[in-house]
Amino acid sequence: MKNESPRSSHLPSSKEKRSTVLLFDSDGFSNYTCYLARGLSKYRDVILYSFSEESFNITGAAKEKGIKFHYIKKWLPKGYSVVRGIIRVFLLFFILFAVLIRTKYDVVHVQELLPTFFLFIPILKLRKKQICWTLHDIETFNPATGINGKLQVLFSKIVSQPTLMAKYVDKILVHALSLREQMIAKKVSQNKINVVRHFDYRYVLEFNDNNAIIKSNDWILEEDYGLFLGNIAPWKGIDTLIDAARIARTKIGDKFNLVIAGKPYAGYSIPFFKNFVKEDYKFVKIINKYIATSEIPGLVSKCSFLVLPYNNSFQHSVSGVIPLAYTFRKPVIVSNIPSLAEYVEHAKTGFIFNDNDSNQLANYMIELIENNSQCKEMGKRAYQKLSNEMSLDTCCKSINNIYNSFNS
C-alpha cells in the first residue's frame, strides 16, 4: 500500500466535490476577510461577500478561481450619517436574508459584528447550517469620545447582539489565548472557542511599487528609525511613546529617530500635540494621514523596529501590526498587554515592557538602535515565528479543520 502524501490528507482530490464556505466580511475588516478567502480557496470553494472591492484585489484573492466575489456596498447608501446608518442596517437585513436563503453552502463564516446577522441564526439552525464566527475584538468599543462614542457603541451592540452570537453560533475564532480566557470568563462554552493566530501580510510584499517613499513636511524618510504605525486612538499609548522618545534622544542623541504614521480617529484630539515643541520635530516625524497599503512596504522596510506602546484599554484585542512587522523581518517592542505579549518571544523576536513605563520602553529602543546586529537577528527570528505559527496557509489549514470538525 502506498503511503498517503501529507497534501492529500488536507486537500480534496480533483474528483471529490469541494465543500463551500459562505464568507461574510464586516466593514473595517475587508483586507483580513479577503486574504482569508484567498487562503481558504485552497481547501474549499468560497462565496465571499465583502465591503471592499479594493481589498479583494490587493490581497490577491481576485486571482483565485475558487472564490465567487460579491460587493455588498453597491446595494448600500454612500456616506455616513444617522439616517444613512439606519437605512444601511435595514437594507443589509434583506441582503443577508436573500443570500442565506438562496445560496448553496455548507458553512457560513462571519467576521466581527455584522449587523442583523443574529436574526438569522434560528433559520440557519433549522436548515442545519453550521455557523463560524471570528471575533477580533472581545469588547465593543468606538474611538469617538464622549456621548457620541457611547451612542455608537450602543447602536452597534443593538444591531449585532454579540452576546446572542456568542451563545448560539457553533464555533468562535479568536486570535489570542488571553482572549479565549476572557470569553470563558463571560460564560461562553470553552468547547466552541478556538484560537487561530492573526495571519501574515505577505500580500503587501506583492506590490510592484515596494520602494514608495512617503513625503511629509518637506522631508524624506531616512533609514533606521523606530516606527509607530496605525490609526491613533486613546488606547494606543502615544503619550508614553513620546516621553520614551525624549528619554532616548537625551541618552544617545542623533542616532535616535522616531516616525509616527497614522491618522487620529474622528473626534479624538491627540493630547501630546499640545505639548509638542520644536525640539521634538528634530527626531519625531509625524505622518498625519491614513497609510495606504501601497505605502506600507516603503515605510516599514526602512525602519529598524516597530513599537506598540498600547495601554491596558487594549487588552480585549490583538493588533495586526505585529504580524505585519514580522512579515518584513522587523522586531517589535510591545507593552505587556496579554493579547500582545503572547505574540512576542522576549529578547528573541522583540521586547515586552510594562505599559506606561516610558523609561523601560526607552531603554529597549536604545538597545535595538545601538546594536544593529542584534536587531537584525531578532528580525530573522520574528520572520521564522511568523512562518511557523502565522502563515496564511497554517492558519487557514486550522480553520478548515474547524469546519471539518462540524461533521465529525
Image (spheres, grey):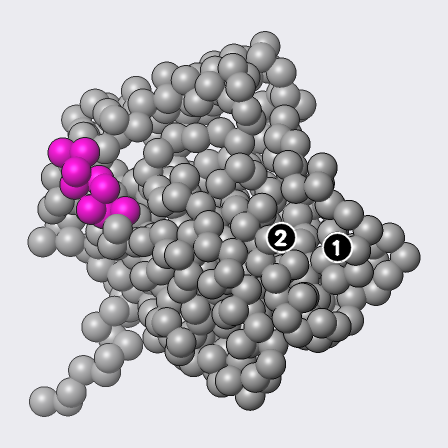
Residue 201 coordinates in the image, percent (x, y): 52, 63
**Residue designated by label 2:** 242
At horizontal 60% and vertical 42% (from top left) the residue drawn is 232
Residue 324 in view: no
Residue 200 sits above or below residue 89 on the image: below
The kind of secondary structure element at disc 1 is helix
Lower position in the chain sequence, tag 2 or tag 1: 2
**Residue 183 covered by magenta stretch:** yes
At horizontal 37% and vertical 17% (from top left) the residue drawn is 158
At horizontal 18% and vertical 34% (from top left) the residue drawn is 186
Magenta stretch, overall SS: helix
The kind of secondary structure element at disc 2 is helix
At horizontal 42% and vertical 52% (from top left) the residue drawn is 355
In the foreground, 257 or 14? 257
Label 1: few (<14), some (14–19) or many (≥20) C-alpha neighbours in 10 Å: some
Residue 309 in view: yes
Separation (CA) of disc 2 from disc 1 = 9 Å
**Residue designated by label 1:** 280
Q: Which residues are magenta?
A: 179-187
In the foreground, 181 or 10? 181
Residue 325 sits above or below residue 275 on the image: below
